[in-house]
Image (spheres, rainbow, N blue to C red):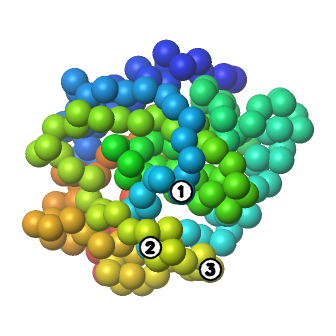
Amino acid sequence: MIFNQTEILTALKDVKTLDGRIPVYQGANIRLEIVDPAYLEPTSKYVLQSSLERVNSTREKIMGQKGIDIYKMPVGIFHEGFLIAPPVVEGNEIVDGLHRCHDSLHNGRQIMVARITGINENLPSIGSSVSWDNVGVVKNKPLLGKDCRELKTNIDDVSINLRTLFRDLSLLGGTGRRPSYGQTT
């Protein structure tokens, strides 16, 4: 099953905070564009080796089976029970699709992203940008939140606070926020 550009953009406009209360991208400008991932800003300090391997395998399977390049697909497709849609970028900050952006960067390829601008300033993404040089490939998620990301100023690493800002991108295949050690969802 393939979701066209209009369906992807409509799904993004309907994204709410993880607690389901606030439409995050209401009134925002959303467009699909191909970018050099070197200019994107990760908001996580790690990528999982197993997820990079899955991205690589998925990329090869989808190209072989459907002839679709997941780096440049302006649509969403279901593959093995998961929806794969373009990574989501707020300004230049990657909020979903970090592993695909990392993979495209290390393979010297541009990537199609859904770039969102004009977001309500009262709904910032939670993580501060880090350079690609500060993103490590790890076997397991770090136990401590400080090893996962740098929170933006005035955002406490308390689950209830994060739920009111974190975007629920499950409609687009996002697997969502994974709580830090000792933190409840």
Q: In which quarter of the image is the N terminus?
A: top right
Horizontally, residue 21 falls left or right of residue 85, namely left
Quadrant in the picture for the C terminus: bottom left
In whole angstroms, how far apart are the C-alphas of marks 1 and 2?
15 Å
Could you say which disc has been placed on residue 21 in the image? none
Query: Where residue 142 sits in the image (x, y, percent)?
Result: 46, 81
Can residue 29 be seen by looking at this rendering? yes
- The three-letter amino acid code for the residue at tag 1 is Ala
**Which comes before the other along the chain, label 3 or label 2?**
2
Kindly identify which residue carries mark 3. 139
Residue neighbourhood size for the residue with mark 2, other residues' Cα within 10 Å, grouped as few (<14), some (14–19), many (≥20):
many
Amino acid type at mark 3: Lys
Please report contact status of discs 1 and 3: CB closer than 8 Å, yes or no: no
Q: Mark 2 points at which residue?
A: 45
Please give the residue where the numbered disc 1 appears in the rendered image. 38
- In depth, the one of 10 and 37 nearer the eye is 37
Q: Earlier in the sequence, mark 1 or mark 2?
A: 1
Alpha carbon distance from label 1 to label 3: 23 Å
**Which type of secondary structure does the marked residue at label 1 adopt?**
helix
Amino acid type of the residue that numbered disc 2 sits on in the rendered structure: Lys
Nearest-to-viewer mark from 1 and 3? 1
